[in-house]
Amino acid sequence: MKGRTWLHWAYAGSSLALALVFAGCSSSAGARNTPVASSRTTGASVPSNPAPTHTPTPTPNPSVTPTPSVLERYLSSKTPVPTTPTPTTNLTATQARQLVFLQVRKCAAEVASTGKTIELALSSFYSPEEERWYIEATNKDGTITFGKYKVSDITGAVTPADMTAAQILQTGVTCTDSAARLTKDPVPPQILISSLPTDTPTPSPTSTPTPVPVIGSKDDAQLGVWLAVYGCYSVFPELASFTAYSNGPGQWTVEGKSATAQYGLWQVDGLTGKITPLDQLAKQAADKCGLATTAAFPPAMTGEQAELRVWEAVYDCFDPKPKRTSFKAYVDNPQRWLVEGRDNTVAPPALYGLWKVEVTNATIAPWDNLARTTANMTACYRTP
C-alpha cells in the first residue's frame, strides 16, 4: 500500500513528493526503533551470564541514511551546463554600439523630422571566431529597422551586415518614414539616393602641391656645399669651415672659410638642391668639379637679403675678405635698401662702401665713391 502511494505522489509533483518522503522517513524510523525498545522491556535478549552489578551501557541506535527526495534525485540527474568564459575584446559592447550610432543617427534624425517618434535601440552580439561585433539598430517601438552592422574588434571599422545597412552607409542618401507597414516586423525607412547631375559638372580647380624643400635648414645647406666641393680643392676642407646664411625662403648663402684656407662663396637653392658659385674662388672650384656656374637671385625682400647681396658682390674685392656681419641694411624707401659696409672691430675701421639695393629685383648700385670704385673693379666685383 505504501509503494503505491509513493508512486502516486511522485507523479503528483516535486513539492508534494517532498512532503510524502518526509512522512515516510518518520514511519520507517519508528519501526526500526521498536525492537530496541521491546528488548529493554521484555528481557527477550538477556544473556546467560549473570547480570553485572553495574548498569549496562545502552546500545547506540544504528545511523539511518535519509532517503533522498524526489527533487534531490531529479537535480542530481541533470548534467551541469558548462559556463562559457567571457571573451576578452578590444571594444566594449557600448563602444561598438556608439560606433554604429554615429553611422545611423543622420538617417534616424531625418525620419524623426517627418513626425515619427524615433528612439534608437541598439542590440549587440560578439563573435569570438570572427573577432567582430554584430549590432542591430531599431526604433524602440519595434516598427523601424535601421539595419544590421558589423564592427571589427581590431580596427573599429563599421560595415553593413544587411541591405538596409548597406544603403544607409552610402553617401548622399536621405531617409524618410516608411508609409507601408504590411507586417508586424520592423521595416526599413525609405532611403532616397541622390541622383547624379546629367550635365557636365564644372571641374574643380586643381591645387598646386606645395613643393618640399630638398635642403630645408641651415645645417643642411652647410652639409650640401661641403659634400659638393669636398674634392675641388688641393686640401680637403672640414665641415666646420662652412657657414650658411638665410637668403630668403628656401635660399641659402654659404661661405667656406677656415683659419688657413678659403673655399669661396656659394648659393644653395633649397627647393632643388642646386649649388652654384658666387665668387671667383668658388667658380674655379666649380669648373674643376663640373658644378653649375650660374646662380639665380630672389628679390631682396628683407634687410638681411639686401646685406647678403652686397656682401656677395664685393666679397672678392677686399683682402682680407669682409665678414658677413660687416654689412648693415637701412630702409631708404619701400622699394629700396641702403647697405653700408663697415667693420669697426679693426683699427682703423675697414670700409666697404655704401650701396643701393632694389627690393623687386635685387639690383645693386653704388652710392658713394668707394662703392663706385669697387664696382669698376670688374675682375672681382660681381653683380647678382
Image (cartoon, helix red, strand yellow):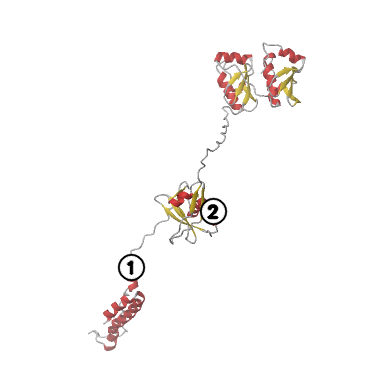
Front residue of 383/1: it is: 383
Q: Secondary structure at mark 1?
A: helix
Determine which of the numbered discs, if any, sits on residue 76 in the image: 1
Residue 108 vertical position relative to residue 275 in the rendered view, above or below: below
Few, some or many residues within 10 Å of mark 1 (<14, 14–19, 20+): few
346 left or right of 156? Answer: right
The percent position of residue 236, horizontal first and vertical second, equals 56, 17
The percent position of residue 24, horizontal first and vertical second, equals 31, 80
- Labels in figure, total: 2
Front residue of 223/374: it is: 374
Mark toward the viewer: 1 or 2: 2
Front residue of 380/201: it is: 201
CA separation, marks 1 and 2? 57 Å
Residue 21 vertical position relative to residue 178 in the rendered view, above or below: below
282 left or right of 135? Answer: right
Q: Is residue 233 visible?
A: no
Q: Secondary structure at mark 2?
A: helix
Which residue is label 2 attached to? 110
Name the image quarter holding the C terminus.
Answer: top right
User: Image quarter for residue 47?
Assistant: bottom left
For image coordinates 60% across by 27% down, the residue present is 219
Few, some or many residues within 10 Å of mark 2 (<14, 14–19, 20+): some
User: Furthest-bottom residue in view?
Assistant: 42
